[in-house]
């Protein structure tokens, strides 16, 4: 059974930092692109970042230079380090696995295979 479990969300003030983690099981990190997407209340889902198992990363323009995605295959854990957080980053964040063909922040949502339950990030001004 495939499972992705996110953790690390919370409430911070503008300029603060959070580190999200996602532990996965039941699938191979070598056959999927891993990434994060988010959804704010009343808004569409949007891809945030992806990582290929060769280390190649992709970010949405809105988070470039502030967020860093990383993957520790030995620990079966995906991370998202979020710095310089802004109120517009407030959303539910989801860890996801996708088809390699869609391994970019722009295309992540088009190739979703499975995703977790999400963790809430709230940034106050």
Image: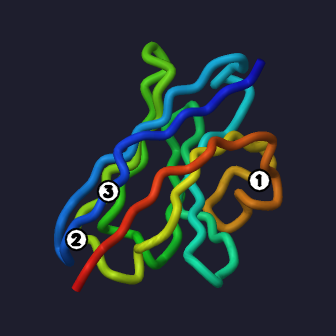
Neighbor class of circle 3 (other Cα within 10 Å; few <14, some 14-19, many 20+) is: some
Neighbor class of circle 2 (other Cα within 10 Å; few <14, some 14-19, many 20+) is: some
Neighbor class of circle 1 (other Cα within 10 Å; few <14, some 14-19, many 20+) is: some
Residue drawn at x 43%, y 17% as measured from the top left? 75
* Quarter holding residue 113: top right
On screen, residue 42 above or below 63: below
Q: Position of residue 121 (x, y in %)?
A: 39, 62
Label 2's element? Answer: loop
Q: Which residue lies under the disc numbered 1? A: 102
- C-alpha span from label 2 to label 3: 15 Å
Q: Which residue lies under the disc numbered 2? A: 84
- C-alpha span from label 2 to label 1: 28 Å
* Quarter holding residue 16: bottom left
Q: Please indicate whether residue 123 sits to the left or right of residue 64 in the image.
A: left
Determine the residue located farthest toward the top in the rendered image: 74
Q: Is residue 35 visible?
A: no
Q: Which residue lies under the disc numbered 3? A: 10
């Amino acid at each position: 059974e495939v499972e992705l479990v996110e953790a690390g969300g919370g409430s911070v003030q503008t300029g603060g930092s959070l580190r999200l983690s996602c532990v996965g099981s039941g699938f191979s990190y070598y056959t999927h692109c891993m990434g994060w997407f988010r959804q704010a209340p009343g808004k569409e889902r949007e891809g945030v970042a992806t990582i290929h198992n060769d280390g190649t990363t992709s970010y949405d323009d809105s988070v470039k230079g502030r967020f860093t995605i990383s993957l520790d295959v030995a620990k079966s854990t995906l991370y998202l380090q979020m710095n310089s957080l802004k109120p517009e980053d407030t959303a539910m964040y989801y860890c996801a696995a996708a088809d390699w063909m869609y391994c970019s922040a722009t295309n992540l949502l088009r190739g979703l295979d499975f995703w977790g339950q999400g963790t809430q990030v709230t940034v106050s001004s």
